[in-house]
Image (spheres, rainbow, N blue to C red):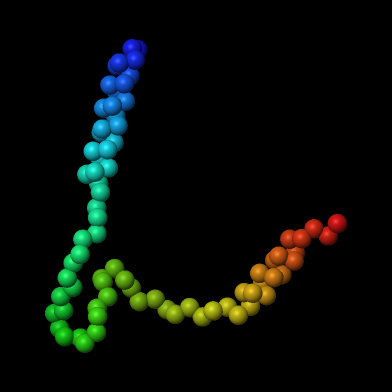
Amino acid sequence: MKLEIARGFFLVGALSVASFAAAAWQEASPQVINLDEQLGYCPLPMQVRATEALRPDHDLLLFMFSLSQGARSQG
């Protein structure tokens, strides 16, 4: 294959990848959240779901210390 043909294929491929990337690009746009009923507080987006508050594990530091001591070679 000639070098000019290979360069042409590469150029067409690079332009097609760039055009697909430009078409798929979605940038966040500023939106105004309207309140149907006056709640008195800022509403959360629909995608955010309420999650349970996780309690911290107070033994985690002790666990990490025991893992680091166990990984040391004894010899």
Residue 27, image x and y in percent? 24, 55
Outermost residue, bottom direction?
A: 40
Residue 57 pos. (x, y %): 58, 78
**Above/below status of 39 relative to 49:** below
* Left or right for 49, reference 41: right
Please provide percent x and percent y for residue 36.
13, 79
Name which residue lies at 66% across and 69% down: 64
Q: Give the answer, above or below, for where 70 lies relative to 50.
A: above
On screen, residue 17 versus residue 57, left or right, reads: left
- Against 29, residue 44 (above or below) is below
Q: Which image quarter: residue 10?
A: top left
Residue furthest right as drawn: 75
Quadrant of image for the N terminus: top left
Q: Nearer the viewer, residue 75 or 51?
A: 75
Which residue occupies 28% across, 27% down? 11
Q: Residue at x 29, y 68 (%)?
A: 47
Q: Residue at x 39, y 76 (%)?
A: 51
Q: Residue furthest top?
A: 2
Number of numbered discs on residues: 0
Residue 49 placement, left or right of 43: right
In percent of width and height, residue 16 lies at 25, 33
Above-or-below relation of 16 to 46:
above
49, 67: nearer the viewer:
67
Quarter assignment of residue 68: bottom right
Q: Quadrant of the C terminus?
A: bottom right
